């Protein structure tokens, strides 16, 4: 009998799905971070601008903080595309993600329309970050990017 056996075909498919799935997840996150970050450089264009102002406006001046978040998000996006310092990039991302949950504590009226079951659009925007965190953790545990690998001994 010639050709691949069912078990080798299944193994190849599994490896292919894992490889391409992780790559798509990484590049998909990169696209979101680059896009959302880029919008923060232009006042009035980011849908998150008002939420950021309501969340931290009492603590920092949104006029510089919103563009700062844009730089941070673009750095995460570029880091995910380049994939040279994956764990440093994901660390920045996870730190950023922790901050995105602040509105649940600082301005809950903006995230709940009927607590505890009905979120506003802003609340949904925040809760979807749980998926981003899960993807970041999945990427973290994978083989590190080439610059993070230790040289072979021997």
Image (spheres, grey):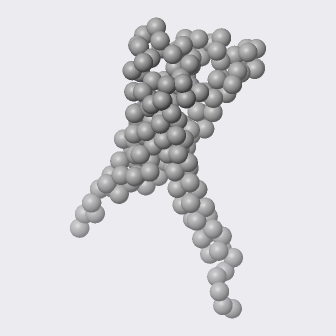
Front position in the image: 61 or 87: 61
Residue 9, picture quadrant: bottom right
**Which residue does the image show at 64% across and 82% down from the upper left?**
4
**Which residue does the image show at 42% across and 18% down from the upper left?**
63
Residue 61, picture quadrant: top left
Identify the image quadrant of the N terminus: bottom right
Question: Quick check: 69 left or right of 104?
Answer: left
Total count of labels? 0
Q: Residue furthest top?
A: 58
**Does residue 102 appear in the picture of this structure?**
no
Q: Residue furthest bottom?
A: 1
**Does residue 65 appear in the picture of this structure?**
yes
**Which residue does the image show at 44% across and 47% down from the upper left?**
80
**Which residue does the image show at 41% across and 13% down from the upper left?**
60
Residue 21, picture quadrant: bottom right
Q: In the rendered view, tell whether residue 101 sits above or below residue 57.
A: below
Q: In the rendered view, tell whether residue 55 sits above or below residue 40.
A: above
Find residue 153 and report its horizontal and vertical position in percent. 25, 63
Find residue 115 and report its horizontal and vertical position in percent. 73, 14
Q: In the rendered view, tell whether residue 58 sits above or below residue 104.
A: above
Front position in the image: 7 or 94: 94
Find residue 78 and report its horizontal and vertical position in percent. 41, 46
Q: Residue furthest left?
A: 154
Find residue 116 and report its horizontal and vertical position in percent. 73, 16
Front position in the image: 36 or 127: 36
Q: In the rendered view, tell whether residue 32 sits above or below residue 63.
A: below
Question: Quick check: 143 left or right of 7?
Answer: left
Front position in the image: 44 or 55: 44
Identify the image quadrant of the C terminus: bottom left
């Amino acid at each position: 009998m010639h050709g691949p056996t069912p078990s080798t075909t299944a193994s190849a498919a599994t490896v292919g799905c894992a490889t391409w799935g992780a790559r798509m997840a990484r590049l998909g996150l990169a696209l979101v971070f680059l896009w959302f970050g880029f919008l923060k450089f232009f006042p009035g264009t980011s849908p998150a601008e008002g939420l950021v102002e309501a969340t931290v406006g009492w603590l920092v001046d949104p006029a510089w903080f919103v563009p700062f978040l844009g730089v941070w998000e673009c750095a995460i996006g570029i880091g995910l595309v380049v994939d040279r310092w994956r764990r440093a990039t994901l660390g920045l991302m996870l730190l950023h993600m922790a901050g995105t949950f602040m509105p649940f504590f600082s301005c809950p009226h903006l995230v709940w329309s009927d607590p505890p079951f009905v979120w506003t659009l802003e609340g949904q925007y925040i809760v979807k970050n749980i998926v981003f965190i899960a993807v970041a953790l999945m990427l973290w545990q994978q083989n590190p990017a080439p610059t993070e690998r230790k040289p072979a001994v021997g």
